[in-house]
Structure formats: structure tokens, C-alpha cells
Amino acid sequence: MQHLLNGFREAFVLLSNLDKEIFDIIFLSFRVSLTATVLGALFCIPTGIALGITPFRGKRIFGRILFTLMSTPSVIVGLLVLLFISRNGPLGFLGILYTPTAMILAQTLLVAPLLLGLSFSLARQQGRVIDRVGKTLGASFGRRVILVMRELKAESLAHAMTGFSRAISEVGAVMIVGGNIKYHTRVMTTAITRLNSMGEYPTAIALGIVLFIISLLINSLLYRFQEGPSYEDRM
Amino acid sequence: MRLSLHRNTKGEIYMKMKKVLIAMLLVLAMLATACGGEEATEAPATDAPTEEATEAVDTTEEAADTTEEAQEEPVEAKGEIILSTTTSTEDSGLLDAILPDFTDKTGYTVKVVAVGTGAALQNGRDGNADVLLVHAKASEEEFVEEGYGVERFDVMYNDFVIVGPEADPAGLKADYGADVKGALQHIAEEKAAFVSRGDDSGTHKKELQLWEAAEMTDPGEDAANEWYTSAGKGMGDVLTMASEMEAYTMTDRATYLAMKDDLDLVIVVEGAEDLFNQYGVIAVDASVSDGINTEGGQAFVDWILAPETQELIKGYGVEEYGEPLFVPNAQ
């Protein structure tokens, strides 16, 4: 309990001192996770929606496999990426092991099934009606996908936020491919792990609090962004 | 024709403008974090020697270094090396203290990957490290013999100790203060709680050697030994566990001293000859992989064996703990 209180106090101290190492860690966390989420969303949300409104053989099984992939443990994703980018691995020539690039890659792969699965599921349910309307208006397949995306914008944004949550909170993948190297690949989650193992609970809690506050700010901004017209606007 | 299911009212257009503004702000914020993070934390995207990229990163570090050593000319930034070492060296804080000196002198930035000795050696075999600093002499010599390492050198040593709760339920301090084999036998007999690294680290290997020397089988092999916990974690974690569980554990003195204030553990067994803990450095051989930075690895080996660095090692910890955490013994 004492640790928790110390943690709050330490959080204030850390932030007010503008401790460079802490800020580097925070910046890197958001850079990695935001990039991964954006990349994942760009590819997976349109694809998921397109797949969701199209009938094809094995669609149900595809859906099930996708949902299973959504719960892949982050360490497994990290391990798989490691095997590829290891110096003697097939992608070793890229030399990205223990760099933020590898971390972004791993998190994108982690978040992709989630975004794909959620968009797919959403399109299957709510997208069908919209798709039908589009068809009656004579829209091509591509136009219909765009139409569904537009109408389901708010939900898609919520999915993207979910993807971001998954990315920012995971520790297994970035630990394995990033190496938790001080000043280079240390993010908030791996830093907290390390502080925890050193028994430095107050600082670990402080970082956790910072992580929480910033996530709250981003989510609030995005939530504001996805709100429909307000009462005043409609009047 | 824009396909949409409704047309925008004035209010909605106004809303859309607000949204675009917020979106722009978010993008700006993202860019800002990307740029801010980039200078300070990003390593060059490839390990290939693209000196322009590394110079951009290293000039910020050099600028800081050269203000401290006003007379020294800035050393040209040479890229990075990956040092795979043990959790005990990193947890003790030694590397944080002395590595800046290496970067000053040679221009190489060191990326420290701290894992157990077993994992560090495996990193060497996979070619994912340029140089190793570990403490399991037998395994290290095997590594070099198998052709993965160039050569092994002694760097520094310290000792292991057995720590436990102050109450010392097994009475180790009184009866076995300097006899580690006897202490281990007694712990097994009394079934006193004991936490082991259990992670193929140098410390773990040493612990297993000691059980063997005490003519006992590895307690971790028998699930019935509930007093024995195989944690599978680093030294810091294991010490914390032992402290929480009020159990005994074997640790290197350096990590224990560094963490002492946060633990409820005291040293109960020390000074035995078989608690000697030797650290060795090995540059990974070029044959392991094309990506190995052999020049940088060798530069690290040369630096850490150099007399000035050995002096730095000797000085580390003296002020804070009253004794050096590591005793240099390079030839």
C-alpha cells in the first residue's frame, strides 16, 4: 500500500523533473504502438470489411480462425518475428533485430488479426444492410466497401482504439524483438517489468500511472472525434 | 458522384471542420513524438554500417560526452555493437557506469541485451550478439572450442553468497557460515525454503555445481521438493521473491548489495572458496554470421581488458557500498 502512495508521489516527481530517460521511454512507447495501430488499421479495416460483406466459401471457418488468431499470446508473435529477423534468419539481412522497427513490425502483426477480425465481424452483421442499399443504388464493390466504411466509421474507430490498447499494453513481443535495451528499445511496459524485477515498485507504479494518463488523453480525444453532431449542432 | 446515405447539414459541416482540426492536431502530436523520440532513442534502422545515420544519432551523445571531457577530441561515431551479458552485470549497474567510457574512446555505441548466461551464449551462437560478457567459465570455453567465439579472457570476479531471512530458521549463519556445501545439505535436510534462478544462467549453473559438490542431486528435478522453487527469472526478481517468501537463495554479492535496501535478506554464508565467481569476455567469431561486427566486438574486448578500464571496474561501488562490487583480474 505504501508502494502505491509512493508511486503517485514518484509519478509527480518524474514528470515535473522532465526526466529525459522517462520521456524517451514514453515517446518510444507511443511511437511504436501508434505506428503499429495505424499501419494495422490501414490494411486490416478495409480488408476486414471487404471480406465481411462478401459471401465466399469457408467464410464461417475463416471467421473462427480469425477469432482464434486474435488471442495469440504476444510472446509467440515476438518469438516468430525473432526467428525471421535473427541475424541468421531469412530476414536477417535487414538488421532490424533490437530496433524500434522490429518492435513496430511485431506489434503490427499482433494487432492485425484483432482489427481484421473485429472489422470482419462488424461488416458481417451491420454491414450487410448498407451493402444491400449500395447495391440497389448501383455501386461497384469498391464503392460499397467505402460506403460501409463511412457508415460504420464510429465503430471502426472504436476498433482501432482497441487495437491501440492491445499494442500499448503488451510486453512480450517488444521484449523479445526489442531486447529492452536502455536508451534504444525500452518502452513503458518493458521498463516497468525491469523496475519490478529490481524491486523498485514506486518508479514502476509511476510509469504505470503516466501510461494510464496519456492513454486516457488519447482515448478522450478520439472519443470526442467520433461523436456525432451534438445537441447544439442539430438545433 | 459521392455515394453517401445522407447530405450534410450546416451543423454537420461545422462538426466535420472541428474533426479535421482535431485530426490534424493528433497527426502533429504523432509527428512530434516520432521526431522527439527519434533523436534520443532510435537506433539506426539497419545494422549495416550506414555512418550518416549513426552519426546523426551519436552526435547528440557525443555532444554530451565532449562537454565532460573538454580536452578530448570528439571520436568519430562508428556504429553499434550488441553486447549480450548477464542480468547480474546489468542489475548491478556496472555497465551503466563504465560503458560511456567505451563510447567516448572508440565511438561505438553499445546495445546491452541482458539475459541469462545460457541465453547470452545462445545469442552468440545465433549471431545476434557481437560480444559476450558472462560468468560460466566451462560453458564459455566450450563456446570458444566449438568455434563460435574468438577467444575467452578473464575480466573480473566477485563472489556468490547465500542470503536468507534475518531470523535464519535453518541456523545457517551459526553453523555453516563459511561452508556452502554443508549449508546446502542442511537446507535440503531441513527442507528450508530455497529459491533458485532455474534459468540456465551463470548463477544457476554455479548453484547446480554446488549441489553436485555437496553430493546431492539437483533438487529442481524432483517435483516432491516443495521447499525448492525454480523461479526461471533474473537475479533481481529472484532476490525479491526470496525476500517475500522468507526463503534462502544464492546470489552474486554485487546484485545483493545493489538491492539490499529493498530486501529483507541478510548474508548467511560467504567466503567459501567454491563461491568464487569469474566473469569472462568473448568476441563472437565472424564465421557465425555475416552481420557480426567483428571490429566493434574486438574493440570492446581490448577496451575492457585495458588497465584504465580495469581501474574503473575496481572503483565501481566503493563509494556507495564501501567495497568494489567486482574485482578486476584481467591478465
Image (cartoon, rainbow, N blue to C red):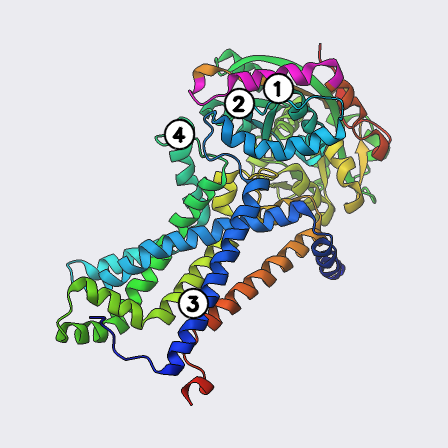
Label located before the other in sequence (3 or 2): 3
Label located before the other in sequence (1 or 2): 2
Query: In the rendered structure, which segment of residues is drawn in magenta?
Result: B288-308
Q: Are marks 3 and 1 on the same chain?
A: yes
Q: Which mark is residue B20?
A: 3
State yes or no: discs 1 and 2 in contact (Cβ < 8 Å): yes
Where residue B133 appears, x then y in whole percent? 62, 23
Q: Nearer the viewer, mark 3 or mark 1?
A: 3
**Label 3 element class:** helix
Q: Are marks 2 and 4 on the same chain?
A: no
Q: Nearer the viewer, residue A224 or B161?
A: A224
Q: Amino acid at mark 4?
A: Gly
Identify the main secondary structure in magenta.
helix
Q: Amino acid at mark 1?
A: Phe
Marks 1 and 2, how far apart at CA: 9 Å
Q: Are marks 1 and 2 on the same chain?
A: yes
Q: Residues within 10 Å of mark 2 (few under 14, many from 20)?
A: many
Residue that numbered label 1 is attached to: B300
State yes or no: discs 2 and 4 in contact (Cβ < 8 Å): no
Marks 3 and 2, how far apart at CA: 48 Å
Is residue B113 at least partly visible in the picture? no
